Amino acid sequence: MSTLSKANIQEVIDVIQHIYLEDKIPWICGYSGGKDSTATVQLVWQALLGLTDEQRHKTVHVISTDTLVESPVVALWANSSLDKMQKKAKEDNLPIAPHRLVPATTNSYWVNLIGRGYPYPRQNFRWCTDRMKIEPSNTFIKRILNAESEAILVLGSRKGESNTRRTLMEGYEKKRYREHLSPNGSFPNSYILTPIENWTTDNVWQFLMQNANPWGHSNKDLMAMYSGASADGECPIVLDTSSPSCGNSRFGCWVCTLVTEDKSMTAMIRNDEEKAWMLPLLDFRNDIAAMSDNELDRKRRDFRRRTGKLTWHNGRLVHGPYKKDVREEFLCKLLQVEKLVHQIGPPEIRDIPLITMDELRFIRKIWLDENHEFDDQLPQIYEELTGKTFEDSSINKNKYYGKSEWKLLKEICNDLFPEEELLLQMQSSILDVESKTSAMAHRRNVKSRIEDIIKKSYFANEADAERMMIERRRRQGVVDDVFSNEEPLDE
């Protein structure tokens, strides 16, 4: 449709009302705070307003997933919208229940990057999307399905978004067993309704500009936010196909390294001097990504995988998790950026942490229990950079060893065996395992755990590991891998 008429809008509202009244299957609306999901929830809202109290017989769950690393501007926008939505739905007596979903602490970005040392996400190791975005939504949907057996997902997907999206949606459209409801490929007994599937980007903006947001959030501010994230800073009311549109602006995680450049955040800073406080975020994001310098990032990582195994690709070892000093440096910089952003940013941003206390406690647990880093640096880093006391009652610290013992052990290892790069890690891990199990009546698996630690630290350094891998491959008659630009990564 070149333009959107009142009849077009009413037709969509009629479809929504018809499907809503057909059965008792609960609805789940996806809401990101962006233009498409806003238009979709707004249409559902208007459809419910057009029904009687008796007809509004089932709940419409509106779910919004906060990855905890969303752009602070977008996170603030979405969270504020959910609060207004909840209040207004109660006033209008609508069965709309907003839900803010977050990833499990163990799956968060900082727990994986700083805690476990996962290399920053990239196309061949995209560990972030499933853990942070998909899993929280799927968990909620499964809970509804377990309780109700069926569910209808209402999404703002449009065929005009891309050729890939069009092909996918048309494929599911052919499998419809009920009009307007496509099967959900991810969950049996759930169906997908896409009310604006045939709308263009221009149609969406026309609808939003001509119809006030019913829960009181400003659609004009939404357009301004998209405009600020566009390279040319323009987001006009589109009247014909020759006019440019800001509809392709993309908001995502401020730490996203799946793109070479964060164009939306860069545009926001460039187009609005009041967004200059976001510069530290952009700089830190670029620092994590090593400015696309793969060799620099490679030096920051252990030459072994997290399991201690070696992987050979393109004539060299594939590096694994970030080293101890790098993880600690990332944490220091993150806390410094958070403090700076809260100082120079607008007042409403000061209540949005860049890393939560639950994440910090979980990272500390990983460093102490999985990595056996009994020097316990995290509380000291936190207290020095924030000036606050680090409170954590969930950790059972090593009773025998701490920071002073770590320092002494490090000095001895470096002085006596400077070429043995893994010696400190091996010795500290053995001491930690032995001390923590010394009071146990049944010391099962202690021997095998110590053996595993020794096997992981078998090599003197990376050069030694490479020589061993080359010799092993020579004996096995294995030829070098075919050259490619990407390293195969895993956990």
Image (spheres, rainbow, N blue to C red):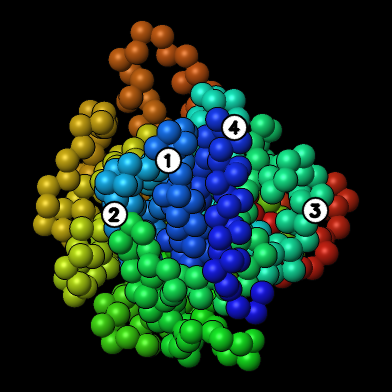
Q: What residue type is labelled 2?
A: Lys
- SS for tag 2? helix
Label 1 close to label 3 by CB (< 8 Å): no
Q: In the rendered image, which quarter contains the N terminus?
A: bottom right
Asked if one can make out residue 324 in the rendered structure from this viewpoint, the answer is no
Q: Nearer the viewer, mark 2 or mark 4?
A: 4
Q: Which amino acid does label 4 sit on?
A: Asp
Marks 1 and 2 sit apart, C-alpha to C-alpha, by 22 Å
Q: Residue at x 32, y 25 (%)?
A: 435
- What is the crowding at mark 1: few (fewer than 14 residues within 10 Å), some, or many (at least 20)? few
| For residue 282, side relative to residue 162 (left or right) | left
Determine which of the numbered discs, if any, sits on residue 52 in the image: 1
Q: In this view, does 405 lie above or below 35?
A: above
Earlier in the chain: of badge 4 and badge 1, it is 4
Marks 4 and 1 sit apart, C-alpha to C-alpha, by 16 Å
Q: Nearer the viewer, mark 1 or mark 3?
A: 1
Q: Which residue is drawn at 64% across and 46% down?
A: 192
Determine which of the numbered discs, if any, sits on residue 84 in the image: 2
Mark 3 = which residue?
Answer: 171
- What is the crowding at mark 3: few (fewer than 14 residues within 10 Å), some, or many (at least 20)? few
Earlier in the chain: of badge 1 and badge 3, it is 1
Marks 1 and 3 sit apart, C-alpha to C-alpha, by 36 Å
Label 3 close to label 4 by CB (< 8 Å): no
Q: Which of marks 3 and 2 is in front?
A: 2
Marks 2 and 4 sit apart, C-alpha to C-alpha, by 28 Å
Q: Where is residue 203 in the image (x, y as percent from the top left)?
A: 57, 73
Q: Which of 311 and 462 is in front in this view?
A: 311
Label 1 close to label 2 by CB (< 8 Å): no
Q: Which of 84 and 376 is in front in this view?
A: 84
